[in-house]
Structure formats: structure tokens, C-alpha cells
Image: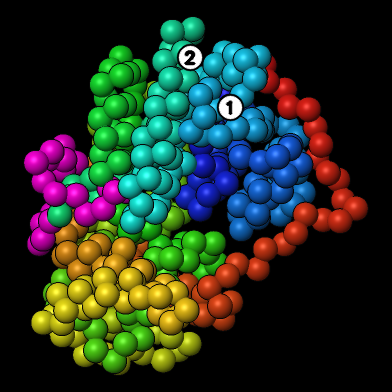
């Protein structure tokens, strides 16, 4: 039997897959969109090399990973009937991570998040009906809480259907949670809602850059349009990955929904600016909250300028992420802290090293290619 994981070749999914492989003995069934097995392995290698060397990766793929070449949004993931049947019969639990993070596109949110989650739920239903499912975990987002200001939000009162959503991404993830609860009420289920996920508290490297890029642009401004006491809820990816894996693997959890967030320990804008360095130099910026609303409007205007002007990308980043930076809202994390016995590291503990890394590498990760002449790991997966 195996755990079926979607999105393992993404940023957060790489943490979950690595923790499952390193900490547990069960097999993993991974859905990867690729032309063939070798291309799929190369995609996985790109995702997991930040966490392990090639030889360890190769051994995991040979011994414990079953790769399914499919499309999350296609009926039965686009798999042949025999392959889909084997996936159903071998799946003991599911961790659904894959999603479109495109916060501006209704089309992407509908196609990937809603249709993709529906296909995952159909697999879960088939596995439950065949032999029973131990657990299904859905990685959602704290943004399902909708437009907020100056609040500390609890898990069970987060979703209010009458409240306005920030963007198509948040709206689609809210409906994904709803489908899970409605369609699989008898299956043990866990919903994880990360807040702003940036970096890793153990090392500076990252393969996710959009939010970091927006944050760096903001930090380098001489005047930052934030109130000194506004709180920004940032959590490191390694804490999020650990929480998802440890709670998913338990026979029982205390709760069905968890905020994976900094909670009341969220840093204020003043603490963030005062605690970060860029190549050893402190940030020297004036915090001016009266500019918050004009900056938001300006970002909308810049995002709509012709691409050849060269500024629409920056405007687009701020348009997407600005509401999440300046809404001064945190998400209570006492549930996950109580169950894990530890709180996430503060962003100022590791953020300076992260900023230096992304600037030194021009917001790219120095990927190592598949070793030429090395073992190809072309192994026919055991799908039993």
C-alpha cells in the first residue's frame, strides 16, 4: 500500500515528499505530468535535489516511489484503466498539495484547483469503497478567510461564505475544502492552511521566488507603506512540511483543520525591518502607512502597462501579494504548536540569509542536471 501525493515536484510538495521518504517506510505514489518516466524522474530530481543528493534520490525512486504519468485535471488523471485501477487498489492515504497559485486567473483556479481536487476526491472515493482510506489531507491556504483586517483568526471560524475573497486562488481553495467535507464525510480528513510560506529556517536556498521577490522589492524601498505595528504572518517551508507529514501519519489528530502559521508570534513591520540585513547591511526605511492604499492602486496601474515597458511584472507581483502583506491579520497556530510541541522559527532568524541567496543567484536556483552517463533509474515501478 502507498501514500498518493499530488504536487511532489512543487516547492512545498518537495518538503512533504522528502519528509515521507526520510521518516517513514511506506511507498509513495506520485502523480507527475511528463512525457515519459525519465522526464518525470528529471522533474522530481529538480524538485528534490535541494533536500538530498542524487544517489539517495535514485535509491528512493528505485525502491519506494511509483511514478504515474498523468494530468491532475484529466478524468482519472489521464491514466490507462489498468494503471488507474492499480492506483485505486494501492492507495492507503492521500496528500493533495498540487494547485495553481495564479492569484489573478479565474481560469487557472477553476481548471487546476477545482477540477483537479474533484479528480483527487474521486480517487479517494474509489479507494474508500474498495478497501477503506486511512486519511486524506488537503493543503489549502489561510487565505480562505477572505478579506480581513487586524484580526487573529481561529480555524473553525475562518470561513464565512458571505465574506469577500481576495482573489480567485483563495476562492477556489475555499470551495475545495467544502467539496472534501461534503463528498467524503466518513473518511478521516485533515485540512492544512499555511499562511505566507517563505524560505527554510535551516538553510538559505529556495526554489520559490515570487513572494520572496515581492518582499525584497518592498524591503529595498526608502519608504515602506506599512504601519510599524502591522503584523505579517510568515512561516518557513520546513515547518509546514513537517507539520503536514507528522499529522497526516498519525492514526488520529486532535483537530480536522490546522493553521500552519506564525500566529501571535507574527512579527510586526517594525520588527521585520529592524531584524533583517541585506549582505550585512541593515534596512534603513521609513514606515509610512498612509501610503498603503495609494501603493495598492499604483500596483494595479503598473500591472496593466504594456509588457515592453518592463514594469508590469513588478506591478503584478505587488498587485497579487500586497493584500497579504498589509492586512495586519494573523492565524492562530496554537493547535499545531500543541501537537508538534514546537513553534515555527521567526522570519528574522533566517530571512537575511534567504535574501542574500536570492540576490546572489538573481532569483534562480542553481539546479544540478541529471548526471550524464550516470544511472538512469529507468526502473519499472512496482504498483502492488
Kindly identify the residue that appears in the image at 10 percent across and 60 percent down.
Answer: 149
Residue 312 visible in the displayed image:
yes
Observer able to see residue 154: no
Position of residue 275 relative to residue 222, above or below, is above
Q: Going 10% across and 62% down the picture, which residue do you hit? A: 150
- Give x and y (percent) for residue 185: 28, 17
Is 374 located above or below residue 257 in the figure? below
With respect to residue 158, does 294 lie above or below? Answer: below
Q: Which mark is residue 127?
A: 2
Q: Position of residue 222 (x, y in %)?
A: 29, 92
Q: 7 above or below 356?
A: above
- State the image coordinates of residue 298 (x, y, percent, origin top left): 24, 78
User: In the figure, is residue 264 to the left or right of 364?
Assistant: left
> Which label sits on residue 78?
1
Q: Is residue 164 magenta?
A: yes
In the rendered structure, the answer to whether residue 79 lies left or right of residue 216 reads right
In the image, 30: left or right of 73? right
For the residues labelled 2 and 1, the Cα–Cα distance comes to 17 Å
Left or right: residue 255 compared with residue 340: left
**Within 10 angstroms of label 1, few (less than 14), some, or many (20 or more) residues?**
some
Whether residue 233 is in magenta: the answer is no
Magenta stretch secondary structure, dominant: loop
The quadrant in which the C terminus is found is top right
**Nearest to the observer: residue 234 or residue 317:** 317
**Residue 78, picture quadrant:** top right
Identify the secondary structure beneath mark 1: helix
Q: Earlier in the sequence, mark 2 or mark 1?
A: 1
Circle 2: element type: helix
Q: Which residues lie in the magenta part?
A: 148-170
Amino acid at each position: 500500500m502507498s501514500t498518493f501525493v499530488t504536487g511532489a515536484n512543487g516547492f512545498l510538495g518537495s518538503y512533504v515528499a522528502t519528509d515521507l521518504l526520510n521518516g517513514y517506510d511506506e511507498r509513495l505514489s506520485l502523480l507527475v505530468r511528463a512525457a515519459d518516466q525519465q522526464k518525470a524522474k528529471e522533474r522530481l530530481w529538480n524538485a528534490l535535489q535541494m533536500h538530498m543528493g542524487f544517489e539517495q534520490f535514485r535509491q528512493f525512486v528505485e525502491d519506494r516511489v511509483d511514478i504515474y504519468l498523468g494530468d491532475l485535471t484529466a478524468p482519472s488523471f489521464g491514466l490507462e484503466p489498468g494503471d488507474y485501477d492499480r492506483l485505486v487498489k494501492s492507495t492507503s492515504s492521500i496528500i493533495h498539495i498540487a494547485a495553481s497559485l495564479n492569484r489573478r486567473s479565474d481560469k487557472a483556479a477553476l481548471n487546476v484547483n477545482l477540477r483537479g481536487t474533484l479528480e483527487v476526491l474521486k480517487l479517494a472515493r474509489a479507494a474508500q469503497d474498495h478497501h477503506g482510506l486511512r486519511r486524506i489531507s488537503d493543503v489549502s491556504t489561510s487565505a480562505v478567510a477572505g478579506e480581513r483586517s487586524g484580526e487573529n483568526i481561529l480555524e473553525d471560524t475562518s470561513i464565512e461564505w458571505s465574506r469577500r475573497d481576495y482573489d480567485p486562488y483563495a476562492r477556489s481553495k475555499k470551495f475545495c475544502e467544502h467539496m472534501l467535507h461534503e463528498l467524503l464525510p466518513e473518511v478521516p480528513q485533515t485540512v492544512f492552511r499555511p499562511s505566507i510560506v517563505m524560505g527554510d529556517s535551516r538553510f538559505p536556498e529556495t526554489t520559490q521566488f515570487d513572494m520572496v521577490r515581492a518582499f525584497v522589492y518592498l524591503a529595498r524601498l526608502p519608504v515602506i507603506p506599512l504601519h510599524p505595528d502591522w503584523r505579517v504572518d510568515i512561516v518557513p517551508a520546513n515547518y509546514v512540511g513537517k507539520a503536514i507529514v507528522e499529522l497526516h501519519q498519525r492514526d488520529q489528530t486532535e483537530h480536522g483543520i490546522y493553521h500552519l502559521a506564525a500566529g501571535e508570534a507574527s512579527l510586526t513591520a517594525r520588527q521585520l525591518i529592524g531584524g533583517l540585513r541585506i549582505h550585512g547591511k541593515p534596512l534603513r526605511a521609513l514606515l509610512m502607512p498612509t501610503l498603503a492604499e495609494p501603493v495598492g492602486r499604483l500596483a494595479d496601474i503598473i500591472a496593466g502597462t504594456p509588457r515592453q515597458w518592463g514594469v508590469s511584472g513588478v506591478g503584478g507581483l505587488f498587485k497579487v501579494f500586497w493584500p497579504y502583506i498589509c492586512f495586519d491579520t494573523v492565524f492562530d497556530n496554537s493547535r499545531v504548536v500543541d501537537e508538534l510541541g514546537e513553534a515555527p522559527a521567526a522570519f528574522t532568524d533566517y530571512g537575511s540569509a534567504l535574501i542574500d541567496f536570492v540576490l546572489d543567484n538573481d532569483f534562480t536556483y542553481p539546479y544540478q542536471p541529471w548526471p550524464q552517463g550516470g544511472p538512469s533509474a529507468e526502473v519499472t515501478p512496482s504498483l502492488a
